[in-house]
Image (cartoon, rainbow, N blue to C red):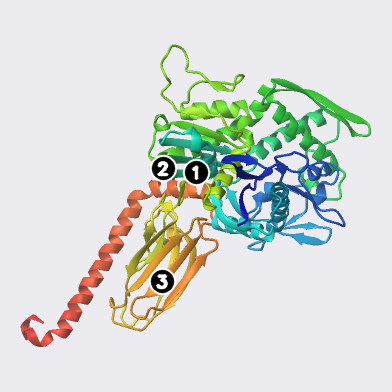
Amino acid sequence: MSKVVGIDLGTTNSLVATVDSGIPLVIADAQGQRLTPSVVHFPPGGEPIIGHPANHIRVIKAAETVYSVKRFIGRRGSELSEEEMLVTYPIKGEGSGPITVEIHGRSHTPEEISAVVLSKLRRDAEAYFGQSVTRAVVTVPAYFNDAQRNATKKAGELAGLTVERIINEPTAAALAYGLDKLKERSKIAVYDLGGGTFDLSILELNNGVFQVLATNGNTRLGGEDIDRRLIDYLLENIKAAGGPDLTEKSEIRNPKSEILVMLSRIRETAEQAKIRLSTETGIEIALPFLTPNFSFSCKLARSDLEDLARDIIARTRLHCLGALADAKLEPSELDQVILVGGQTRMPLVRQMVAEIFGCAEFEEERGALRLGTGYHKPKGPQLNTSQNPEEAVALGAAIQAEILAGGFRNVLLLDVTPLSLGLETFGGLMNAIIPRNSTIPLKAGEMFTTAVDNQRSMLIHVLQGERERAKDNWSLGRFTLDFDPAPRGIARIGVQFEIDANGILHVLARDTKTGAQRIVEMKSAVDVEDAAVQQMVEESVEHAFEDLAARRWIEAKLRAHETIAAARKGLAEGANEIEADYR
């Protein structure tokens, strides 16, 4: 049987990992590099260049080099903001059409570009094992919607991989920490701040079962936002020092502009400066010969970077508190907070996480936790930094791959639904079938009947949200089930929702009389942004009383109609038994 590998397909870097002799490890490439930059350069002729070489070429061939394509996978043109379109390679996307990257007269989809990176990781794994690798577990951010998950799976297939399982990145990270680090019954928070996404998940480990109690996050928040902030800071300083004015962002959209080369150099310098300032308190930035007549240099302190990044990192606070509220937990009830993602190396991130969760005091320079003054253990959770934050997700994916291959003890992963799923019922109400934060994979169903006489079909309108009325929730799709006409209330239609381990929703509707059925896979079933999820939850709380009043009013009217209909039917059927004076 072929090996099953674990893959972290990241916004900034990607990794492939395995379990060797019971030890999870990241597989290095031929150059000994364990991290592969998620960067692909398309030369005018020949094969794409991937990873570190592509990252170097990106400085001088910015318009032909694709990076951070994970931000676009599974999304439509209408979903992109102006800021997201400001990349150094030409990107297209309008309305509900697909997003494409146009290079050398050819269109490339984000899935195809991701497949190029995955193919490189597959080849690295094959070189390590000395045999073909065709099966993988691939991770995605917890708040990736259904379309993005399907697109990630498609990318794997294009790379020649059978994607055995798609698991959430925080869940994978918990596996990496959890098998030998946590006690048998623990509650942990996984704080995952990577290059392009942020996720906060609350998990419980109990007798080998990982259950996600709640999850929250932002698919457009990560280290790249700090990179952009630092780049803008450098651009302003370059301009103030008498250098070229590169602050006009419209120039970035011109793939022929020589400005692209300068911007790429500045970007690379900013990224390296950010990394260095995680371990140094101050550095010197040098950009010699930015133009033939201008060189730039300046001093940058860690405090300068922290001032630029503080509000970006602070945006993670609301997501952390939201997840705690959903899990009905106080920070003091957590045992550990696990840090995942390269951006969590930044001391300010660790400091803010410690403040949010009330962790034990964190000593930046020693990278360790201390118990404070005296001998009393702090009440807050432990801030766990024992794993390499950039490798934890890949290692967890490898552990899950080994579980699927039968090589590890059984550890069950249970993710949750971010919002309730249900149907529109008569009167325009939302009937929840799968409540919010239900553990997946799961099946749930309910029996429905007809509302009028001789009804020949039923419209199955699938909804997602927390509001009482259908119109206030999100529509995931509609389909119709035909059946034989019958009097009102006689037909019985069973509707079943099934969410698989990849978070993909399947809806089955069956006529219990004839057995006729339809099964529909909602390929865009959870096609909502995390900010919209948060807004839906907030609106459900804000409008709770009026929504409940509306539901009670509609249900009262429906019961009244049912009573009237039943009375009329009884009068019609038993008219001869009722004295004329009482009819």
Q: Which mark is residue 577?
A: none
Residue kind at label 3, given as amino acid type: Ala
Identity of the amino acid at label 2?
Asp
Tell me: residue 134, above or below residue 197: below
Q: Can I make out residue 365 in this image?
A: yes
Residue that numbered label 1 is attached to? 216
Mark 2 neighbour density, 10 Å: few (under 14) some (14–19) many (20 or more):
some
Q: Is residue 36 above or below residue 442?
A: above
Residue 332 is situated, as x and y percent measured from the top left of the image, at 40, 29
**Residue 370 picture location, percent across and down:** 51, 18
Q: Quadrant of the C terminus?
A: bottom left
Task: From the top left corner, tell me how far across and down residue 553 is, in percent.
Answer: 28, 60
Is residue 529 in view from this perspective? no
Q: Secondary structure at mark 3?
A: strand
Residue at point 78%, 50% (across, down): 89
Cβ atoms under marks 2 and 1 closer than 8 Å = yes
Q: Furthest-right residue in view?
A: 292
Real-space Cα separation, disc 2 to disc 3, in angstroms: 31 Å
Q: Is residue 403 above or below residue 189?
A: below
In the image, residue 297 sits, relative to residue 271, either above or below, namely: above
**Disc 2 or 1, which lies upstream in sequence?**
1
Residue at mark 3: 509
Local packing at callout 3 (Cα closer than 10 Å; few below 14, some 14-19, many 20+) is many
Residue drawn 66% across and 35% down? 226
Residue under label 2, please give it: 326
Callout 1 crowding tier (Cα within 10 Å): few <14, some 14–19, many ≥20? many
Q: Are marks 1 and 3 in contact (CB under 8 Å)?
A: no
